[in-house]
Structure formats: C-alpha cells, structure tokens
Image (spheres, rainbow, N blue to C red):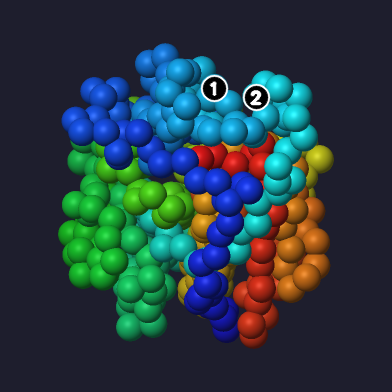
Amino acid sequence: MTRVLLLGFALAAAACGGKTFPSLCATQFPPPAECTTACDASPSAANSCSSGFHCSGDGKCDEVCTASGGQCGNDYSCTSDGRCVQNGNGNGTGGEPDACPSAHFQAMKTTPSIQLLIDRSGSMLHDFGDNQTTDATKQKFTIEQTALVGPQGVVTLLQGSIFFGASMFPSGTCPGLFETATRKAGNEPDIAALLSAHPPDPNANTPTSQAIDGAVTNFMANPAPKGSPPVILLSTDGLPNTCMDSTLSAKARADTVTAAKNAFAKGIRLFLLVEGNKFDAQFGQDLANAGQGIVAGQPPAIVYTATDPKSLSDAFNAIVGGVLSCDLQLSGQVDPTAGQNGTVTLNNMTLNYGTDWTLDPNGLIIHLIGNACTTLKNSQDPVVDATFACGAIIF
C-alpha cells in the first residue's frame, strides 16, 4: 500500500543580510506599462522584457530598482535588468566581501498542478495482456477509471490537496484533446464525467507527441498558480504513431521524446506510466528521462509500469504521492542557474544535487528525488532545509 505523506513545514525565511527589495511594479501607481508584460520565466529563456526589467517567477516583467534610483542601498548594486545584487559576489561592483554569505530557507508543502494525459486509443479496450475482450471489467481503460475516480481512486482521495485536470487523446479531431475545463481542487466530478463521455475509440491511433504538445499549450494558456509545480502524468499503453499514419516509426518516437524535452524546458515535468507490455524498454526510458530532465551521468528516471489492476493503482499513487510529498516550496526565490550550489539537508543529512534533489526552473520549488524522496515519505516528522549563497537569491 502506497503511503502518501502530507507535509506541513513551517514557513521561515531570512533575506540576504536581512535586506528585502519590494517590487517597483507593486509600489508605483500607476505601475509602468512593462509590468503587465508576460514573459517566459524558465532559466533557458532569453529575457524578453524591456531594458531595466527581468522576468519574475510568476511570468511577468518586473523591476526592484533603477540604475540611478538608489533603491538597493549600501553594499548592493542595481543590474541592467532591474535586480539588486550583493557587491562582491561577482555580479555587482566595488569588490567588497558579501555582507551575508548565505540565505537560509525552510521548505513547505506545495499544492501541485497535475494534468492527467490519458490514452484513449483502441488498444485501451484490451486486457493487460493485449488481448481483445468484450468484458469491460478486464479492459485497461475501465480499470484505469477505477484507479483514478473510483471510491479509492487517487483523484477521489487527493483532490483536496492537488489541482487536478485531465486531457484525453486523441479527440474526434486528431490531434486535439478532450479536456476538463480547468485544473482545480475538488475536480473529481469533472474528470469522472470526461472519462465516461470519451471511452477509447477502436479506430484511434496514438499521437503521443502531439498530445504532450497540447498539454503544454494548456499549461501555457492556463498557468499553474505561483508556487504550484506543473506536472503532466502520461498514461499510455502503446508506442506512438500519428493521427494519419499507424506506423510505429522511429520518427514518431523521436518526436515524442522531443515533446517531453520541450515540456521540461518550460518548467513542466512529465511522468510516464506504461500500461501493459507493448512498450519498447529503451524508448520508455528515453521518454521518462526527457520528461524529468535527466542527463548523462544522473540516475535514470523511473518508468512506472502496470500489468494488472493493483499495479496500475499503485503506480498512480506512487507518482501523485511522490509529487505531493517530495515537491517542496521555498520561502523565497533562487536563481535556477546558481541553485545547484546550494545545500539541502533532510533530517540533518546533506543531499546531493542531481541524485537527491533538483531545483525547479522557476527557482521556487525543490524536488527531492530517488532515495531522498523515499526517505521523506517514510519519515514521521521530516525536517528539510536549504541554504543558498546570497548571489543566488532573487529579490
């Protein structure tokens, strides 16, 4: 039985040297027009904001200082994109040592935003051995409905703690999606209705790359709330093809891995759940790694598999429970390009970046992974905290 731990860490933060810098967008009336400009907050994205502005973690252009405004005060300098940085850390001027060598955070639980991406191709009407059956109780799709929205389903039990939404692929106009109207807490009725209204189509293909792209588009149009990690949970039983071509081609597989990489680059992690035994192992691993941003030298991502009703329910609970328990919101924002130099501890044990923890591209969420995630979920009274150099803190 999978144990889901709801963490309730206290929020406690100290800004670098006790210094905080308010947003000029919030303190000026009327605010500059640039303050309403949307931008891409992912670390790899170029700064699309006007000169003097940077992209804040909530995806809007912002500034906390101007070149001649003096908002940063002593020992700090204003950068060309409107941030205050500590002098002496390589980003400012003056060559003085840092007034404060680090900033200390404690972590707290998050409310994740999880978009279920559900395969409704014809093979979902088969049993777990991929045999055709007219007995609905043995069909993978019916069993999946129970695992999600049945009395003990993961959505039913955790809908108060997670913003759930659902997409099903393909829709009647492939490669479109059938989708719930929104992601929200308490969304089990809408998800149950969606599943009931759109059972698998015996003639449908499996355009997985386009489906992932569609789920990403959904997140871009309807972003997760600030501090809520966005996640795509892909459940599928077949190798990908396209709407018009049923060929299980190498290109369709490569396109699917690329779609998962693109999702991760936008700050959206993808978890893979394979139902049945039709998946190619190497492709599945490549897809899972891409969805988690795993690079060479790091432990591989988990490919969750289900070959019977119990293992399907267990897999859904393991994925959702891991996101719920092991994604921790920082009480401040960290520059994601410098975050790996921070120190994170779990129950006074120092964790290793890349194998035990990673930092979300928005700089707001720590993801505990692997054995560290398992330890966290099994701890009765876990204590997680994080320390980052002053130069890594975003004010």
**Residue displayed at 52% across by 51% down:** 332
The residue labelled by disc 1 is 79
Quarter of the rendering containing residue 65? top left
Residue 124, image x and y in percent? 39, 57
Element type at mark 1: loop
What secondary structure is marked by label 2?
Answer: loop
Residue at 81 percent of width and 40 percent of height? 297
Give 159 or 229, whichever is nearer the viewer: 229
Alpha carbon distance from label 2 to label 1: 7 Å
Q: Is residue 142 above or below residue 115?
A: below
Residue wearing tag 2:
92
Q: Quadrant of the N terminus?
A: bottom right
Q: Is residue 190 visible?
A: yes
**Splitting the image into 4 quarters, where does residue 59 fall?**
top left
Question: Residue 351 occupies which quadrant of the picture?
Answer: bottom right
Sequence order check, earlier mark of 2 and 1: 1
Is 308 situated left or right of 39 in this image? Answer: right
Q: Residue at x 29, y 23 (%)?
A: 34
User: Residue 228: x percent and y percent?
Assistant: 42, 54
Proximity of marks 2 and 1: CB atoms separated by less than 8 Å: yes
Q: Looking at the picture, which amino acid does disc 2 mark?
A: Gly
Nearer to the camera, 253 or 383? 383
